[in-house]
Image (cartoon, rainbow, N blue to C red):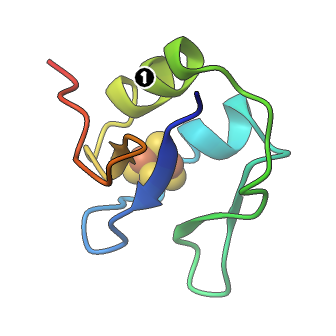
């Protein structure tokens, strides 16, 4: 199972952490806010949770196969 990534661009502070850690999956858009460029990535759920937890803006959300938000605490 792979969680679906969502980025709340209202919370993204353009730190570049996700883009630096996984440049195949995240990139900056024209406004220098993070966006997901590869929704068919092969990152496992544990890696996705770490990426979300490491976002300094808490802008990365994950959803499970039922569409529910994954608790990152
Ligand atoms: S780690 Fe978070 S705050 Fe930094 S660029 Fe990515 S989404 Fe934005």
The residue that label 1 is drawn on is 49
Residue 6, relative to residue 24: is it above or below? Answer: below
- Determine whether, in the image, residue 55 is placed left or right of residue 68: right
Quadrant containing the N terminus is top right
Relative image position of residue 51 (x, y in whole percent): 49, 27
Q: Residue at x 25, y 63 (%)?
A: 11
Quadrant containing the C terminus is top left
- Between 24 and 2, the one lying in front of the other is 2
Relative image position of residue 65 (x, y in whole percent): 42, 44
Q: Does the Cβ of the disc 1 residue fall within 8 Å of ligand 1?
A: no
Relative image position of residue 71 (x, y in whole percent): 17, 28
Describe the element under mark 1 as helix, strand or loop: helix
When asked about the image quadrant of residue 62, the answer is: top left
The single residue placed furthest to the top in the displayed view is 46
When asked about the image quadrant of residue 39, the answer is: bottom right
Res. 15 visible in picture: no
- Determine whether, in the image, residue 46 is placed left or right of residue 63: right
Residues packed near mark 1 inside 10 Å, few (<14), some (14 to 19) or many (20 plus):
some
- Between 67 and 11, the one lying in front of the other is 67
The single residue placed furthest to the bottom in the displayed view is 30
Q: Residue at x 31, y 37 (%)?
A: 56
Residue 26, relative to residue 8: is it above or below? Answer: above
- Between 71 and 51, the one lying in front of the other is 71
Res. 21 visible in picture: yes
Q: Residue at x 50, y 38 (%)?
A: 3
Residue 34, relative to residue 44: is it above or below? Answer: below
């Amino acid at each position: 199972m792979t969680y679906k990534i969502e980025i709340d661009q209202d919370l993204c502070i353009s730190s570049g952490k996700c883009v630096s850690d996984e440049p195949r999956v995240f990139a900056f858009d024209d406004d220098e806010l993070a966006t997901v460029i590869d929704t068919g990535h092969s990152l496992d759920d544990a890696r996705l949770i770490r990426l979300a937890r490491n976002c300094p803006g808490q802008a990365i959300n994950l959803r499970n196969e039922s569409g529910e938000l994954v608790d990152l605490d």
